[in-house]
Amino acid sequence: MLLLIQYTLIFASVLVLVALGGCFSEHSGVINIGLEGIMVIGALGGALMMKFLGGGAPAAVVILLVVLSSVLSGILCSLLLGVAAIHFKADQTLLGTALNLLGAAVAVVLVRAINLSEDIDNVSSTIKYGEAKSAFIIRIGDFEFNWFMLIAFVVLILSYIVLYKTKFGMRLYACGEHPQAADSVGINVYKMRYAGVMISGALGGLGGLVYITAGVSEWKFENGVAGFGFLALAVMIFGQWKPLNIGLAALLFGFFRALSNVYTGFDFLLSLKLPSVIYNMLPYIISLIVLVFVSKKSRAPKAEGIPYDKGQR
Amino acid sequence: MNKERTKKASILRNDGFQTTISSILCILIGFLIGYIVLLIINPKGAGDAILAIMKNFLYYSSAVSAKKYLGTTLVKASALLMCALSVLFANKVGLFNIGVAGQYVVGAGASLYFAVGLGMPWYVSLLAAIVFAAALGGISGFLKSYFNVNEVISCIMLNWISLYCVNMLLSTVKESSTPYTKPLSSANKDGLLPNLGLDKIFSNNKFVTIGVVLSVIAAIFVSILLDKTKFGYELKATGMNKHAAKYCGMKEKRNIIITMMISGALAGMGAGIFYLSGIEQWMIGQTSIPAMGFNGIAAAFLGGLNPIGAIFASYFIQHITSGGTYVDKTMYCTQISDLMIAFIIYLCGFVFFFKLFLNKYLDKRDEKMAAKAREGGEA
């Protein structure tokens, strides 16, 4: 039971971070389908940092550097989307797809190149970071508390405050709803959209890092992040683009994802004798069902996906 | 002389010409970036590696084996072409079918299960692939039109669900000693697509079947369907403005569902002609979705969202994907070509801007020339 709570919380943390990233980006008016790719790149940045730090450094330094590295890689990756979508008016869905493919390909090529240069026989795309990872975990009895759970919670609260209580948040909203009106009162729409995309990059990258450190101590980058970026988008839609609802939605999805990891620990689930594949599919099936019920009255930001053109009214 | 100039300008202004130019530009920049990445990884072998990717089957000096591997590339390109057609068909109707990957997976599962598990002849298996993939596409279309579920998200969820389901289904026809499905050549000879003598052209490459021809026919069919029929016109109208289409008496909901079904059918057929040629077996328990579908998105956009353009684009993409396997593996990995393809798709996003820029430039030039001509006349 404790294990189930632990996994639920950690997967929910991933989903909260990434879904909030998507939320910021969409409120500024840019659809970010590339979150999956951004997660992979963020995970790569964090994993490489952990690999090079090893186990020697003090915990606080490890946490700071690793988080910083994955956030920066995420932002860098999101800028690819930002520049093309905001300044060059490119199709955002296409760009997002490209970003997903690019993230996966870059990660594999880079990791393999590093592995090959260290050992000529090592052709795997796996990075091991077991030693540095322990800095993130505090054992409380049987419960493994992960600093990321706290970080995700803080980010959730901060997002709520930023989006609803600050000038910046209101302006961001305006740019996603009616950019022409926002521009007419002197808000720089391009700047706001860049801000939205970069925040989504930072949170997406961080989410990727949390995902690969959840439970395992090495990661095979050929696997990417198994559609978690898209699950996060489903969480965002389920949460109706509102931070607090996103938090609750993430808990629900995190629970079903956690179930596939730990269902063997429950006698009544084992007695059902369902194949394990069913549990693997569960998060995706649930999200489809949930989407069917909430999409009809969904209130997405009005101007999302439409490149801002000053000359248009 | 003036006449000559207007003629030249009109070629530059031709939309098809602009698309071709921008696609070629994307490819060139993609190669350049690939080369730079290779240089960063290991400057010694970068030149050879990029040449190996470009050469692909020409890597073999003997004409016989070069022809044979050209055949293999063609078989893979034909499956890719079907995926590209699937993407561009949906795109013409304003839908982004990222579910092409899942539909491809379902097509693979259905065709292999019918051929290996049930011992059906190839045409039944191929039909099964088409029908099941169409049904999967139809689900996304249905959710989109009746429940307003974003088709990209629902497609991605269905991609993963279908991958797990197909793995489960095909584990019933698994070879006992390997993680693969039983090979068609031993399990069910009738399940293989007929060669019709095509294998003779490619130095007895038995994988070259009527599938290659079928895919090209499908491209021409899609082109005619979209541009020359009332049905295609209705679909495109629905894509441009759903509400206007409804106002004109078109059944916009039905059109969306049918579009996704046709799109799925094309992807499923791609999987059918690929796996029923016997070129590859399905690996059971694979945890990532086959890249074929996603590469289809690249091919569709690189081909300028035109069925005929997609033929060339798919061949090109498959050419460099296969070429990636010839790089020196002590220094680089084969995924370098995936990286180049991903960059090429990314660059395709700039095509719209490129055209805008080019047209603006042409307008300015024409204006200048007109002004000059006027001045000359006055003087």
Image: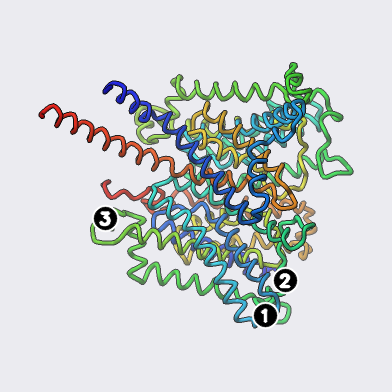
**Secondary structure under the numbered disc 3 in the rendered image:** helix
- Mark closer to the observer (3, 2): 2
Residue A270 is situated, as x and y percent measured from the top left of the image, at 79, 59
Q: Is mark 2 on a helix, strand or loop?
A: helix
Element at label 1: strand
Indicate which disc, 1 or 2, sits on the residue closer to the N terminus: 2
Using the rendered view, name the quadrant where residue A36 is placed.
Answer: bottom right
Question: Marks 1 and 2: which is nearer the front?
Answer: 2
Kind of residue at disc 1: Ile
Q: Which of A312 and A101 is in front in this view?
A: A101
Horizontally, residue B74 falls left or right of residue A166, namely: right
Quarter of the image with the N terminus of chain A in it: bottom right
Image label count = 3
Q: Position of residue B166 (x, y in %)?
A: 72, 41
Chain assignment, label 2: A
Decide which of tag 1 and tag 3 comes sooner along the chain. Answer: 1
- Residue furthest to the top: B196
The reply to whether dot 1 and dot 2 touch (C-beta < 8 Å) is: no
Using the rendered image of the protein, determine whether residue A102 is visible from the camera's viewpoint. yes
Judging depth in this view, the residue of A26 and A128 nearest the camera is: A128
Task: Indicate the chain on which mark 3 is placed.
Answer: A
Provide the residue designation for mark 3: A181
Q: Which colour scheme is used?
A: rainbow
Report the amino acid beneath label 2. Gly
Mark 1 lies on residue: A138
- Residue at the extreme left: B378
**Where does label 2 land, which residue?**
A130
How far apart marks 1 and 3 lie (CA) works out to 49 Å
Output the chain of dot 1: A
Q: Is residue B134 left or right of residue B57?
A: left
B315 with respect to B326 (left or right) = left
Q: Which residue is drawn at 10% across and 29% down?
A: B379
